[in-house]
Amino acid sequence: MLNTIIVLALIVNLAALIIFWRKDQNNVYAVFIITIVFLFGATVYKDSEPEWKKYQREYKKLLIEKTKDPKKKKSIEAAPIEVKQLWNQGLDVADRCITCHLGYDTPEFADAPLPYKYHAKAREHDFNKVGCTICHEGQGRATEKVDAHARGIPHWDNPLLPVNMVQSTCGKCHSEIHEEGKELKGADMLNLAKKLSVTNKLEVPCITCHAIKGVGEILAPDLSEFGSRTEHEFELSHDLTHIEGEKNMYNWTYQHFLDPQKVTPGSPATATTPASEPTIMPNFDFTPDEANALTVFVMGLKEDKIPGKYKYKPRAEPKPKAISRFQEAISHEEFEKLPFGEQIFIHYNCWYCHTLKGRGGKIAPDLTHVGGRRDRDWLIKHFKDPGSVSPHTFMPTFRLTDEQIDALTDFLASLK
């Protein structure tokens, strides 16, 4: 908007110069002075009212509407309007995306419009640890939408990825996408591409001709770092003349999977087009979805720059262990069938100190017939604050919920 105003101001000044220069130069100077003052005021206003402040005010308004607690509303209203940043020195990440994308970790904003919408992966990834641009790319330090998304910004190599391309960055931390027999949960396109790279209509695995991460042949280009090239580097090494639509790396790769011979037919050396050999890649008759999945996969093959401590390491599923019930092992299935109060008794290892029906420890009172000695009120007080009813007890105070206390009381009260 400001750029448009500046252009209009220049046109007005040029018109004033042409019309009044010979008639009355004072009018020309007056127009120039008014223009300078106006542009100075517009610049000051733009700096004092940046785009992100508008988004923060609107988010606060939406958050207040969703909040019922009066105290929380006052806290929200008092929150400062300021630039917010996720910073990680190890990853060289300083992302200010959450200055506008404020609802990214608020489930109540699942149906909110952008940029306030809740991020579905917020619970699976620690954004405070890894930031935003590690997955989405873009210019993380920027605070204006156009600059942050960085699409069309000269000399910026990593613009914001379209939604259908975000999975291309999963391999930065999830090495299992390159491991045989493993799938990455939530990365449907990558899983499909990996399957197609081995099993396809022609039954020709990609590594028959290409090398990927040190595995495969060298009949065709090594794809290990295919996605590391910038758009400019890609243009210098590839013929884009046969591409439909925008001439870029994504379209070349996508259309090459759909029809290799059309995209790389080979051409003689000319003054403007480098010589290229006809492709030897056969047409696999991929569908558009399959071609897109493969494009996402190969564009995710990049130089590994992520420190090892940020690599995702799948946790081995623990094997079910037997649960001790008063010094006797029982299975999980048996445990689940017990009354809730007895489950709590076992879970908190009450039997370490107490005996119950001849089993358990002997350093605290026997609870076999405790229901005949103590009433519910006494038991409840004892669980909430043992010292209030037994001044000399060494029983610790367990942080039990009211529901747990009621269930444990029911269990012990039944022991008569």
Image (tube, grey):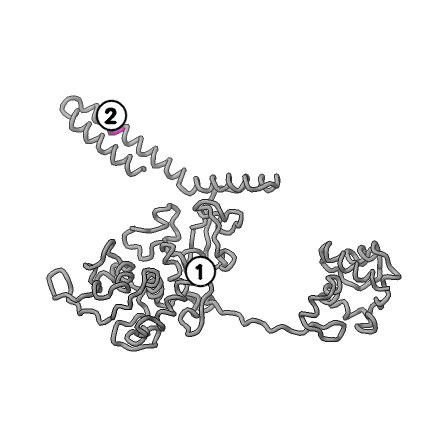
Q: Where is residue 343? Give x, y as percent.
A: 72, 65
| Residue 389 picture location, percent across and down | 84, 57
Indicate the position of residue 280 as horizontal and vertical percent values.
Answer: 22, 72
Mark 1: amino acid: Gln
Residue receiving disc 2: 30
What's the amino acid at mark 2? Answer: Ala
Q: Is residue 71 left or right of residue 275?
A: right
The location of residue 385, given as percent across then percent down, is 78, 56
Instruction: Give the crowd class for mark 1: few <14, some 14-19, many >=20 residues within 10 Å.
Output: few
Is 245 displayed left or right of 161 in the figure? left
Secondary structure of the residue carrying tag 2 is helix
> What main secondary structure does the magenta stretch of the protein show?
helix
Nearest the viewer among 167 and 361 is 167
Quarter occupied by the C terminus: bottom right
Earlier in the chain: of badge 1 and badge 2, it is 2
Q: Which residue is drawn at 45% across and 45% down?
A: 113
Q: Which residue is drawn at 18% across and 24% down?
A: 25
Q: How crowded is mark 2: few (under 14 residues within 10 Å), some or many (20 or more)?
A: few
Would you identify the image quadrant in which residue 164 lies? Answer: bottom left
Q: Quadrant of residue 161?
A: bottom left
Of 295 and 60, nearer the camera is: 295
Residue 89, numbered circle: 1
* Residue in the foreground of this view, choosing between 374 and 39: 374
Specify the segment rendered in magenta: 29-33
Q: Real-space Cα distance between discs 1 and 2?
A: 53 Å
* Quarter that holds the N terminus: top left
Count the marks.
Answer: 2
Q: In this view, does 332 lie to the left or right of 407?
A: left
Mark 1 lies on a secondary structure that is loop
